[in-house]
Each structure stands twice: as C-alpha cells, then as structure tokens.
Amino acid sequence: MISLAYAMGAPSGGKAGNPIMAFLPLIIIFAIFYFLLIRPQQKRAKEHKNFLESLSRGDEVMTSGGLIGRIAGLTEDVVTLEVADKTRIKVARSYILGKAPKKK
C-alpha cells in the first residue's frame, strides 16, 4: 500500500492560478469596508472637529452626557457652560456633541 503511494508521486496541480485573482475577493471586501464604514466615519470626525473649532460664546450646545447649556467661556481644552442662572460647569471640549435641539 505504501509503495503504491510512492509510485503515484506528487499530485500535479495542473495550471497555477493568477495570484491577483486569488486576492481579488479580499481586495473587494476591503474596498466595501472603506467606502461603507471607514470613509463616512472620517468625514463625521472631520465635521465634528470643525464644529468644535467654530464654537463661540453664547452658543447653545449639548454634551455627550445630555446636558444642555449656553457657552459662557472657552479655552483650548475646556468649555464653561451655563446650565441655569449663575450655575456654571466646566466640560472637556471633546464632550460637546453639537448644537442644542431647538425649543418647541
């Protein structure tokens, strides 16, 4: 039985495939992930960065914790929000989500 296996020799693969065609599905999947996930996330991050840079005193904003307040002071890293009359809190600038929703 063993001598028969040696007599048969190594199986010939026949024609070798194109290596690019072997990686084509992987390349297509990466392209789909890039256009559906990575690119929109980068665009959103860029818009948020521009929003944070354009903040000014008097803007009403909402934090990631759900607090809504008017900007009373700004530094490079910290925003001072006035959430009620004479009640001010300091919040890291990166925790500002966006403009406050309009009052009805």
Image: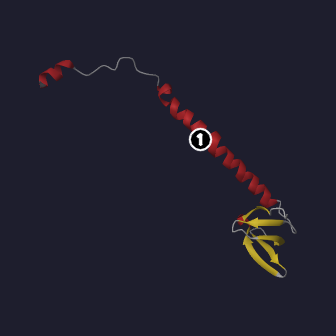
Question: Where 45 sits versus 6, above or below?
Answer: below
Question: Where 76 sits versus 4, above or below?
Answer: below
Q: Is residue 7 left or right of residue 74?
A: left
Quarter containing the N terminus: top left
Residue 33 in the image, given as x and y percentages of width and height:
59, 41
Residue 49 in the image, given as x and y percentages of width and height:
75, 56
Residue 5 in the image, given as x and y percentages of width and height:
17, 23
Residue farthest along the front direction in this orientation: 104
The picture quadrant where one finds residue 100 is bottom right
Residue farthest along the bottom direction in this orientation: 86
Residue at image point 51% right, 34% down: 26
Quarter containing the C terminus: bottom right
- Front residue of 101 and 46: 101
The picture quadrant where one finds residue 9 is top left
The picture quadrant where one finds residue 70 is bottom right
Q: Amino acid at mark 1?
A: Phe
Q: Is residue 6 left or right of residue 75?
A: left
Secondary element under disc 1, as helix, strand or loop, is helix
Q: Find disc 1 in the rendering and name its residue.
A: 33
Question: Where 76 sits versus 17, above or below?
Answer: below
